[in-house]
């Protein structure tokens, strides 16, 4: 797998279990790209939904993808603090077209005080039936929720104090 060069722009694509394109984020600047993780930054970028709707993100964000965990994390920098949006999905892949992963519906929103909320369990239940998620995927995702909650409580990885700020400074340099 070739990795994008630091400072280059990539597209991020999420898919659903059935292979359909779910969402596309245009113009994420690569701040770190290795076989283990990719960190990117963006600000007020265009997002395309599978139904054709488009919208712009509202604030600068740092995106954290790993090759081993079944989640990715977006740290959104707002006036009242850093909010995190954690997507449960497959580890990333990267090709010359985009960074890609399969989104499995469940999300965790983390507030600046590090409290959190599990989101979209109803969507997960519906899509699990509609797209016939294998039982092992559900087991992985339930364990991943626990792992992610552990990372949040331990302030590990992108939740570590200063992590988002450090990478945001790198983003401003490359912008």
Image (cartoon, rainbow, N blue to C red):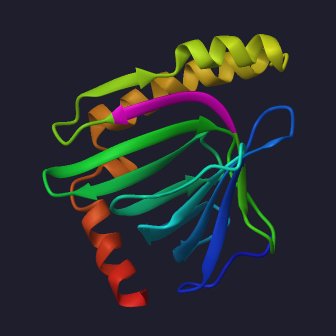
**Residue at the spot x=54%, y=64% of the render?**
46
Picture quarter with the N terminus:
bottom right
Is 108 magenta? The answer is: yes
Q: Is residue 46 left or right of residue 174?
A: right
Asked if 150 appears above or below 99 in the picture, the reply is above
| Residue 138 point in image, percent of width and height | 69, 17
**Residue at the spot x=57%, y=65% of the render?**
38
| Residue 71 point in image, percent of width and height | 56, 40
Picture quarter with the C terminus:
bottom left
Is 117 magenta? The answer is: no
How many marks the image carries: the answer is 0
| Residue 134 point in image, percent of width and height | 83, 17
Instruction: Answer with the quarter of the image where residue 105 lies.
Output: top right
Q: Is residue 40 left or right of residue 126?
A: left
Instruction: Answer with the quarter of the image where residue 33 lies.
Output: bottom right
Magenta residues, start to end:
103-109
Instruction: Answer with the quarter of the image where residue 93 lies.
Output: bottom right
């Amino acid at each position: 797998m070739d990795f994008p060069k630091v400072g280059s722009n990539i597209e991020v694509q999420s898919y659903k279990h059935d292979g359909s394109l779910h969402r596309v984020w245009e113009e994420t600047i690569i701040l770190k790209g290795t076989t283990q993780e990719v960190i990117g930054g963006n600000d007020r970028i265009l997002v395309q939904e599978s139904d054709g709707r488009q919208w712009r993100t509202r604030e600068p964000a740092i995106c954290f993808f790993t090759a081993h965990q079944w989640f990715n994390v977006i740290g959104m920098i707002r006036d009242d603090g850093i909010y995190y949006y954690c997507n449960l999905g497959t580890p990333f892949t990267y090709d010359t077209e985009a960074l890609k992963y399969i989104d499995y519906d469940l999300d965790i929103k983390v507030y600046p005080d590090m409290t959190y909320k599990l989101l979209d369990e109803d969507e997960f239940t519906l899509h699990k039936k509609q797209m016939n998620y294998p039982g092992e995927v559900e087991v992985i995702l339930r364990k991943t929720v626990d792992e992610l909650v552990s990372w949040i409580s331990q302030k590990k990885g992108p939740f570590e104090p200063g992590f988002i700020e450090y990478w945001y400074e790198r983003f401003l340099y490359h912008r």
